[in-house]
Amino acid sequence: MPYRMAKIPNDQLPEAKADVLIVGHTHRPMITWVGNTLLVNPGSLGQPRDPKKSTIRTYAILDTSNWEATIHGFEQARD
């Protein structure tokens, strides 16, 4: 399931001194690099918020052997 890479300025995460940062809150899936930090938002299994895909539940898998993340999803009607 392809997801766009978000464009986030490097100065948005100045205090994050991490190789990988996994965030949530927006419930919208995203994978991007901010400087040298891989930023991942897995989306949501319980409350998907993408207005164009409101029935797609998403989650992320992080492969720590090569530090690549992928977003996966499946369709299920909202409760």
Image (cartoon, rainbow, N blue to C red):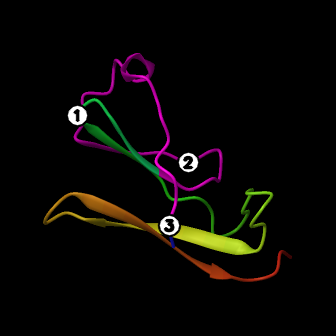
Image coordinates of residue 14 in percent, x first then y, are 35, 18
Q: Residues within 10 Å of mark 3 (few under 14, many from 20)?
A: few
Q: Is residue 75 left or right of residue 17?
A: right
Q: Is residue 62 above or below residue 27?
A: below
Do tag 3 and tag 2 residues touch (Cβ < 8 Å)? no
With 79 as the anchor, is 29 left or right in this view?
A: left
Task: From this view, report whether residue 68 is shown above or below residue 5.
Answer: below
Secondary structure, mark 1, is: loop
Q: Which residue is mark 1?
A: 36
Q: Which quadrant of the figure has residue 9?
A: top left
Residue 55 forms part of the magenta stretch: no
N-term-proximal mark, 3 vs 2? 3
Q: Which of the two marks, 1 or 2, is nearer to us in this view? A: 1
- Residue 63 placement (x, y as % from top left): 24, 67
Q: Nearer the viewer, mark 3 or mark 1?
A: 3
- Residue that numbered label 3 is attached to: 2
Task: Residue at 51%, 73% (x, y): give it.
Answer: 1
Q: Look at the image and give the residue range highlighted in magenta.
A: 2-30
Q: Which mark is residue 25?
A: none
Q: Earlier in the sequence, mark 3 or mark 1?
A: 3
Tag 2 residue:
24
User: Between 51 and 21, which is closer to the camera in this rendering?
Assistant: 51
Quarter holding the C terminus? bottom right
Q: Amino acid at mark 2?
A: Gly
User: In front: 79, or 56?
Assistant: 56
